[in-house]
Amino acid sequence: MSNLDDYRIEARNWLASMAGMFGCEARHGLSHEDDLALGREYMRARHDAGFSGINWPVEFGGQGLSHIEKVVFETEEMQFGMPVGYFGISLGMPVPILMRYGLGENGEHLPWVKERVLRALRGEEIWCQLFSEPAGGSDLAGLRTRAETDGNGWRLNGQKLWTSWAQYSDYGVIIARTDPTVAKHNGLTYFWVDMKAAGVEVRPIKLAGGDSHVNEVFFDDVRLEDSQRMSPVGGGFAVAMATLMIERYVATDSGGFGPHLDLFIDLMRRLEVNERPALGDGRVRSAIARNHAMRAGLDSITTRAMLMLQAGMEPGPEGALNKLVSVRSRQKLSELAIDLMGADGLQFDPSASQKQDWGSSWINSPTGRIAGGADEMLLNTIAERILGLPQDHRPDKGVAFNQIPA
Amino acid sequence: MSILYDEGQEAIANESARILEARVNKARQLELLEMVGEYDETFWHTAVEQGWTALAIGEEYGGLGLGLVELGLVAQAAGAIISGAPFLTSGYGVAHAIETLGTDEIRANWLPGLAAGQFRAAVCFAENNSPLPMRPLVSSSEDRLSGRKPAVTGGIKADLALVYASIDGGPALVLAPLDATRRTAVASFDNSRLFADIDFDGTPCHLLVSGEDARRLALDVLARMAVVTAHEQVGGAQTLLTTARDYALTRKAFGQPIGAFQSVKHRIAELYGQLEIARANCINAASKAGQEGFLVAAADARLSATEAYDTAARDCVQIHGGIGVTWEQGLHLHMRRTRSLASEQGNMLFWEDLLVDELTGVAA
């Protein structure tokens, strides 16, 4: 207990000492390129300080601690607005999966993997995750990008979509269809791909809020060596699921990665509703109270999960609620804040932080409700996995992929 | 900071649930709905026999010296089967006030009897629709109490009441035996709550505290009882969630279990979310009793548990379709209980305002 408190204080002190150089204020107004460069600098400093790869093995450049320390550090780090977004996916999923599935049958790729991991930890290289496609998002196994055998390697053709940070990525992990004649989950194989290889084209997509961190990625006859294969042929879906499960314990935010409720209260202190103090208005008070009760519940769930981890127990499944409940509440609260601000609510700064600014929080909320599991998929997961309710009717079940009506 | 239950607490939760599930009698519960002024004696005898009445009372007075966490777990088990009497909650509130404010004599007079289930206690705070009126109409002197407290939970059978009254223009908490009062049972949709209008007419009483302290302590008692009630609501919501889930798995329509339809399965999944948020708030609040931030935690628990239980009752009935609104099926036992529990200890608007008062320092 006290060790963990010490760790938290140590982390907070280090972060505070770095905030002037890398935090929100230092980043304000930077171009994406300059911000990324700053981010790379921060990642190097973070690795040097011993706060990177916190729960990864020491032999890969990590710290060999548990995910409790990792979550503690991430929770603290989140307060400072450090430029870590570019590296979140990279270190969250593809690189850990590379350590697990990329070593080769006899560990022959170990030195290469070690170099990649170290460079990724230090922000020198970025990995992306090439999963979603126009025909496969929530229904991932519906993907159409294909890898066909080509001599002793493979040839990759097709299109990925919504790939975060692909434009800055050096490598990616990808799942592609290697056999369209079997049921959709069984014909997929998992590879890594060099994002600088001939035939890879990345096109950023501008999102509703104005930023372009996601991309479509085209593969035109891209050559893959068989040594780039990270799953058995046809066994890719299991590795894809492992990728999505590998970071089971991540820092959560009961504010849905939007502004803290205190910011809403501060705003209401300054505002009036129908020319009377907003904090005296029953509707405003109800919104504050209900949001507080909801967020306090999520925080208590998180606290208990941490206590269970510390006690060597498996946290309960209720942790799955956080994103579902918090992000949509953030969306509604942001709408209310903008509306109550009146004329001021109409001002918009596309570079403002989602955690500080109601306009930015609002316009980016839908992304949060779709990315990383749409609300509807999360509800299905809760219903099916936790409550044991039946799966949806799936007419494509057991049907060969190339026989499913398009 | 929330907590994990320890082994002893887990045992209390499991054992109380096991015993109550074995003894619950739906036919009797249905019968009691139409009997004004009666309650489920089996439930009450079980509570006494199991020592639940003694749970949160100090050992020096024959109690078990445990607290709100443990009582909350019993309340959750009681809520799961729709408890047959209201005295666990009000008895706790009154005993807590006596332990905090009473003289040695008062404590010795009442606490052992409350612990042993020999006395049943009621809390008379509300007037009209105000859970804790700013200027109570019931007035008190040092030793006499006058005025009416309406629809007091447990009022028709209680032996003793903790009353929020006015004294010298300010608030006071007084203790009054009820045997000499005139009590009128209130016919309700949830009769085993034993609601009664109580008329005090120069009733002998004992002043516990007056002035600002009286309001502060009354609020603390109310918040503690609200946390007990919130656990009861969570227990009820859990039962309804499980009932809805089981029905959705067995009932078939259009060639498949209705639980395969997203309109039904998502409704149940949403309910799970509300329930777990309420449960987490309850655990947090119970662990904070007597500490800084307790009122906020209690309000969070109260609001989320009321929302969870209300939604659970609404949705569970809806998922059952026609069978869900029959007398015999009995889901209306929960429906009825949602409203009595939502009113007892103060409605949602009261707790919303209290919570925002605490968070912002700005009164409504």
Image (tube, coloured by chain):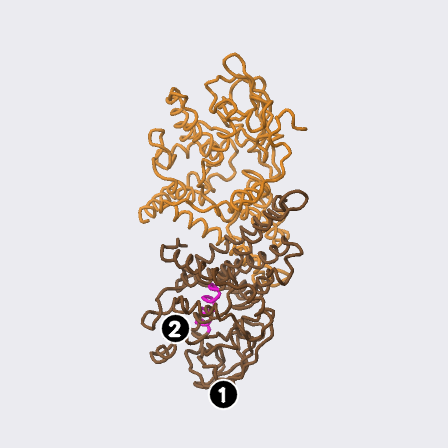
Chain colours: A orange, B brown
Q: Earlier in the sequence, mark 1 or mark 2?
A: 2
Q: Is residue A100 left or right of residue A355?
A: left
B202 magenta-colored: no
B224 magenta-colored: yes
Establish if B126 lies above or below A14.
Answer: below
| Residue A92, position as x, y percentages in the image | 45, 34
Amino acid found under the numbered disc labelled 1: Gly
Residue B51: quarter of image: bottom left
Find residue B202 and name its label: 1
* Chain for disc number 1: B
**Residue located beneath label 2 in the image:** B116
SS for callout 1: strand
Establish if B312 lies above or below A11.
Answer: below
Question: What residue is shown at x 51% (from left), y 18% (from top)?
Answer: A224
Quarter that holds the N terminus of chain B: bottom left
The reply to whether residue A130 is visible in this rendering is yes
| Residue A73, position as x, y percentages in the image | 39, 42
